[in-house]
């Protein structure tokens, strides 16, 4: 008696057991993060090829992809020297002939496949060879075995997927076809029925089917490239819908279980600090600070994002927020993505802290030995009231006595775990996050649905607007002329490069090379 129990098919089933996969191919698929059936459903094409329009051989145009039907006139291996060999197939239709060449092949299989008289649907890009003849290198081909043959990937719009070495497009399409054939009936709906009806969305299973194998008679490749088909719109809506549901649950959960410390926000320290400022706060800064102070007065920990362009005054808003924490006998922290930025904030904030008698510390990876021990000890004892640092702040060695508020600058540069680790340094501290990344208001409210969002949309008086210009490589001289004009006015210029030194792997400009070329151009510097 066979003791093997039958297992009901599930979208969690390993991809290995799908027809056409097996252990070796499963390892290749894992490189693409494809392990279970559901992974494959969401492995969407990054583009589509239109193979639906049939041409004749006489109408083929060099360097333009085309699909045509032809039969094999002849085939065989051509030897080009001792080691190099090519398998050549000559196809013909009623209008003429053309050649197809294959450089990686099994001769026996190719001879069996391309027998004289066999009919094929062919897709590829013709090119003119040295003999002024049209030929196609490694075309996609499908044999036509009868009048009722339905082509699998030629003569229609075909999806193109990201792949990896050893895994071909045809293989991925074949596996996906087998996945959909067996598992599509198991796909459950996740959007409520009233929303489906209101927006006239396709079912989830039909959307998966159409996005992987679109019907060429209904939509063009251009429609698919612009994400205009019903299948794509439905899946886009589903993704945003589920994100919003998740964020709503997260926000509700955070509000239910967390209790922090309510701050008093009209203390003497803030008034003294504002008197030290050589300028007036903008209306936008006052509006955002009102949002922050309203949050801080609640026991529920603040979780607010500030979005504002460079130069709109986010740092002053952050500093007033930090001082509010200090005024409530709490330690505060400012985490920034780079040591340069940490040092810059430290130097800018220190004069105010000295004037107000507040202990300030800088924590970066360059702290060593006794100096590091002393800084860490002052933080742990509570002597340090404001700590500025990089991701070094989340190290286990750093212990706060009573961290009540944390500010994170350029939050996209930190992972969720790093932000959470900083939050765990205190008892549910208030959290303020800042970003200069330009995000449309509606998109910000969508992406950060679990956070409250404020916008700094006003520049301080006299502050010049930042101008962004794009120069292409052939306009390099123009860019350098602009730099030179600014430097002659006593200003500085920064040139940022993707690499320090030349790389054999990446074709990118290196700082060392650019530095040498700038020295040649501006020898007086």
Image (cartoon, rainbow, N blue to C red):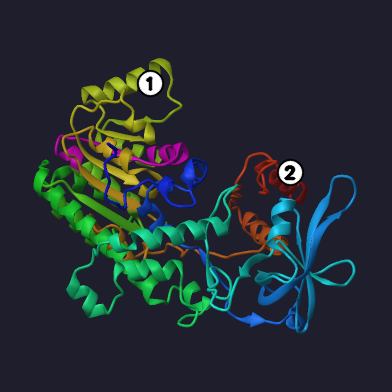
User: Within the magenta stretch, is there residue 344?
Assistant: yes
Instruction: Classify residue 512 by image quadrant.
Output: top right
- Up-down relation of residue 258 to residue 249 (above or below): above
Spatial CA span between label 2 and label 1: 37 Å
Q: Is residue 311 visible?
A: no
Which residue is situated farthest in the top direction here? 370
What residue is at 43 percent from the left and 28 percent from the top?
A: 365
In the figure, 213 relative to 296: above or below?
below
* Nearer to the camera, 190 or 277: 190
Q: Nearer the viewer, residue 419 or 224?
A: 224
Task: Find disc 2 in the rendering and name its residue.
Answer: 516
Q: Quadrant of the C terminus?
A: top right
Q: Position of residue 237 (x, y in %)?
A: 31, 69
- Total numbered labels: 2
> Image quadrant for the N terminus?
top left
What residue is shown with label 1? 372
**Is residue 391 among the parts visible in the rendering?**
yes
> Which of 122 and 508 lies nearest the eye of the viewer?
122
Residue 263 lies, in percent from the top left, at: 12, 44
Which element type, helix, strand or loop, lies under badge 1? helix
Where is residue 320? Give x, y as percent: 25, 47
Q: Magenta residues?
A: 325-346
Q: Which of marks 1 and 2 precedes in the sequence?
A: 1
Which residue is pictured at 28% across the width and 57% down the height?
448
Could you say whether the residue bearing mark 2 is in a helix, strand or loop?
A: helix
The quadrant where residue 210 appears:
bottom left
In this picture, residue 219 sits left or right of residue 507: left
Residue 267 shown in magenta: no
Furthest residue toward front = 1
Which residue is at 80% across, 59% downward? 76
Q: Is disc 1 surrounded by few (<14), some (14 to 19) or many (20+) residues within 10 Å?
A: some
């Amino acid at each position: 008696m066979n003791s093997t129990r039958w297992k009901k098919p599930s979208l969690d089933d390993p991809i290995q057991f799908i027809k056409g996969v097996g252990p070796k191919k499963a390892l290749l698929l894992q490189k693409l993060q494809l392990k279970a059936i559901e992974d494959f459903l969401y492995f969407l094409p990054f583009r589509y090829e239109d193979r639906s329009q049939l041409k004749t051989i006489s109408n083929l145009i060099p360097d333009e992809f085309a699909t045509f039907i032809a039969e094999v006139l002849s085939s065989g291996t051509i030897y080009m020297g001792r080691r190099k060999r090519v398998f050549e197939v000559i196809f013909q239709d009623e209008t003429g002939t053309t050649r197809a060449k294959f450089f990686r092949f099994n001769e026996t299989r190719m001879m069996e496949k391309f027998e004289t008289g066999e009919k094929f649907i062919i897709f590829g890009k013709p090119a003119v060879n040295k003999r002024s003849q049209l030929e196609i290198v490694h075309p996609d081909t499908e044999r036509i075995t009868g009048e009722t043959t339905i082509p699998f990937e030629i003569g229609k719009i075909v999806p193109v997927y990201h792949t990896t070495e050893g895994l071909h497009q045809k293989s991925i399409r074949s596996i996906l076809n087998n996945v959909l054939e067996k598992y599509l009936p198991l796909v459950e709906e996740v959007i409520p029925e009233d929303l489906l009806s209101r927006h006239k969305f396709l079912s989830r299973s039909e959307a998966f089917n159409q996005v992987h194998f679109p019907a060429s008679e209904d939509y063009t490749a251009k429609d698919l490239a612009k994400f205009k088909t019903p299948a794509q719109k439905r899946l886009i809506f589903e993704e945003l819908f589920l994100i919003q549901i998740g964020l709503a649950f997260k926000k509700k959960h955070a509000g239910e279980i967390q209790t922090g410390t309510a701050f008093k926000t009209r203390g003497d320290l803030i008034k003294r600090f504002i008197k030290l400022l050589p300028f007036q706060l903008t209306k936008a800064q006052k509006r955002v600070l009102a949002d922050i102070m309203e949050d801080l007065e609640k026991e529920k920990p603040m979780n607010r994002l500030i979005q504002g362009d460079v130069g709109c005054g986010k740092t002053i808003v952050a500093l007033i927020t930090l001082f509010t924490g200090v005024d409530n006998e709490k330690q505060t922290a400012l985490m920034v993505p780079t040591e340069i930025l940490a040092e810059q904030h430290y130097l800018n904030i220190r004069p105010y802290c000295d004037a107000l008698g507040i202990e300030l510390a800088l924590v970066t990876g360059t702290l060593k030995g006794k100096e590091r021990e002393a800084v860490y000890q002052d933080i742990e004892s509570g002597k340090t009231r404001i700590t500025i640092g990089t991701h070094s702040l989340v190290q286990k060695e750093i212990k706060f006595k009573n961290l009540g508020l944390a500010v994170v600058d350029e939050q996209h540069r930190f992972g969720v775990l790093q932000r959470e680790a900083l939050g765990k340094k205190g008892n549910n501290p208030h959290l303020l996050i800042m970003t200069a990344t330009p995000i449309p208001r509606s998109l910000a409210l969508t992406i950060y649905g679990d956070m409250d969002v404020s916008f700094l949309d006003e520049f301080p008086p006299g502050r010049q607007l930042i101008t962004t210009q794009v120069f292409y490589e052939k306009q390099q001289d123009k860019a350098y002329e602009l730099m030179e004009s600014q430097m002659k006015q006593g200003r500085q210029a920064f040139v940022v490069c993707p690499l320090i030194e030349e790389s054999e792997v990446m074709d990118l400009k290196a700082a060392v090379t650019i530095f040498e070329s700038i020295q040649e151009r501006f020898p007086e510097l």
